[in-house]
Image (spheres, grey):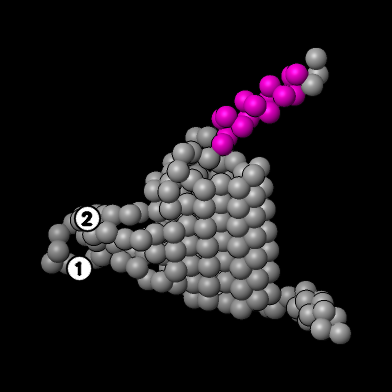
């Protein structure tokens, strides 16, 4: 009886939380409801990753009569918190093992804001460069990661930070705009030791 209940529960979970049609999703990956997914066929999620409730994942193929070629790629074992907003007209990549907190905003574009071209909402979107978040990084509560930013591996982004430019591996950053607080030297030295050992 217990096994039947467990099987039924797992079946219901799989039905309710499975990614929508069009999303390329790996084994054991879920997107919790309610959710909003635009451009599902341009979204790829690796194995064992989860996106929690009220997320908006938008890969925009067209806007204001302009066509784009978007791609949102989420790696394996990535966990994204509630109310996350990821929007792309070029590319957003979140590498394996990242933990993204709640209310995080990540985008690779901005609205056109030409004063003589009418309402901002009706102007084309403008690419400011792809965004990449390196493997095993942590992005804190209410962080904004703006277009063109590349974060290295094993970075930590403090709560409320607005990240306007790129940072290397093992960076700890915080603030508005975000700045380097320190390097995770203990982790950096450990990684170097592993690399050296692998070459012996």
Q: Nearer the viewer, residue 50 or 55?
A: 50
The residue at the far top in this view is 1
What segment carries the magenta color? 4-18
Return the residue at label 1: 114
Report the front residue among 196 and 123.
196
Decide whether residue 11 is among the magenta residues.
Answer: yes
Q: Quadrant of residue 87?
A: bottom left
Q: Going 65% across and 76% down the picture, which residue do you hit?
A: 169
* Quarter of the view holding residue 148: bottom left
| Label 1 element class | loop
Main SS category, magenta section: helix
- Asked if marks 2 and 1 touch (Cβ < 8 Å), the reply is no
Residue located 73% across and 75% down the image? 184
In front here: 70 or 168? 70
Say if residue 103 shows up in the picture. Answer: no
Q: Is residue 122 left or right of residue 198?
A: left
Find disc 2 in the rendering and name its residue: 64
Q: Which mark is residue 195?
A: none
């Amino acid at each position: 009886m217990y096994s039947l209940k467990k099987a039924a529960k797992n079946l219901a979970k799989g039905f309710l939380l499975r990614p929508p049609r069009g999303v390329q999703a790996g084994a054991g990956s879920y997107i919790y409801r309610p959710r909003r997914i635009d451009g599902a066929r341009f979204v790829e999620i690796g194995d064992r990753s989860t996106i929690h409730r009220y997320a908006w994942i938008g890969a925009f193929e067209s806007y204001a009569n302009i066509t784009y070629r978007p791609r949102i790629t989420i790696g394996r074992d990535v966990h994204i918190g509630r109310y996350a907003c990821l929007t792309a007209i070029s590319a957003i990549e979140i590498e394996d093992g990242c933990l993204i907190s709640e209310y995080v905003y990540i985008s690779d574009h901005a609205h056109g804001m030409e004063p003589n071209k009418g309402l901002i909402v009706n102007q084309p979107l403008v690419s400011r460069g792809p965004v990449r978040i390196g493997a095993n990084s942590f992005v804190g509560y209410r962080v904004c990661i703006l277009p063109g930013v590349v974060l290295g591996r094993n970075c930590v982004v403090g709560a409320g930070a607005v990240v306007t430019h790129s940072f290397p591996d093992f960076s700890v950053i915080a603030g508005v705009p975000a700045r380097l607080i320190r390097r995770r030297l203990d982790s950096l030295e450990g990684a170097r030791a592993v690399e050296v050992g692998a070459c012996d």
